[in-house]
Image: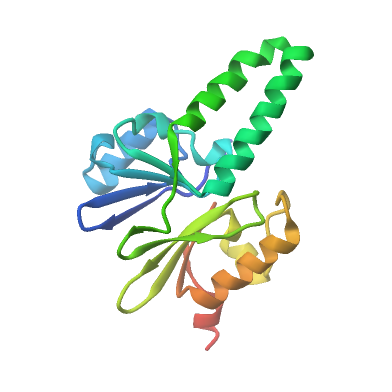
Amino acid sequence: MRTAHATTTLVRDGDRRILVDPSLPPATLAARLYERSGLSPEDITDVFCTTLRATHRWGIAAFGSARWLCHEPELQAARGHLEALDDSARRIEKDFVEDIQAELKLLERFQPAPDKLTAGVHLYPLPGPSAGSAGLLLATPTQTIMVAGDAAVTSEHVEAGRVWGGCADVEAAMESLQEIVEIADIIVCGHDNVMLSPTRWMR
């Protein structure tokens, strides 16, 4: 059985090398990165997580020299959730306290993502899949690319106009998906490959 993982994307802009959603285990991801790009983890300048769900950050420990970024509302929501769990665990399930504290420590390593990571790479809020989920909008002279995360979970979902069943807010997720389809020429799905936006191939 194949282990579930998210799409990991490498974005290059000038001297910046941004890895989006480091989803594979650290050693596997480092090997795949070198195989596909010739880069080592130390060459990555920034890691951006579209959401803080564990599947989207499984291999992040390999990138200790990079800046870790996430949309600020997602950081706040994750921190609030973990702090509430920590409070409950200390009263009821003390065995989980150490794991929760480790997660909180991991969150401390993240910085809120700026509105522009580079001149051509823009933070794009895509609420709905999680409280503060966001993608990256890549503006080139000829096309617009959206690295969408779980807001466009697979090409099948996009083509059917459906959102992921585990969304935190289905209505907001539908609005985010509609924005992606309207704005992007190319969509990098959160758990699938790259696809042309339906609005482009239906013309």
Q: Position of residue 162 (x, y in %)?
A: 69, 64
- Is residue 2 in view? no
Color encoding of the figure:
rainbow
Q: Residue at x 33, y 44 (%)?
A: 46
Of residues 159 and 53, the one nearer the viewer is 53
Residue that lies at the very extreme toward the right in this rendered image: 92
| Above or below, 43 relative to 200 | above
Q: Quadrant of the N terminus?
A: top right
Q: Position of residue 19 (x, y in %)?
A: 36, 47
Q: Position of residue 4 (x, y in %)?
A: 57, 40
| Above or below, 72 relative to 155 | above
Q: Residue at x 76, y 20 (%)?
A: 88
The quadrant where residue 89 appears: top right
The quadrant where residue 29 appears: top left
The quadrant where residue 30 appears: top left
Q: Position of residue 167 (x, y in %)?
A: 70, 52
* Residue 29 appears left or right of 105: left
Q: Residue at x 73, y 55 (%)?
A: 169
* Residue 51 appears left or right of 63: right
* Residue 55 appears left or right of 188: right
Q: Residue at x 49, y 28 (%)?
A: 106
How many numbered markers are drawn? 0
Residue that lies at the very extreme toward the top in this rendered image: 95
- Is residue 111 in view? yes
* Residue 169 appears left or right of 15: right
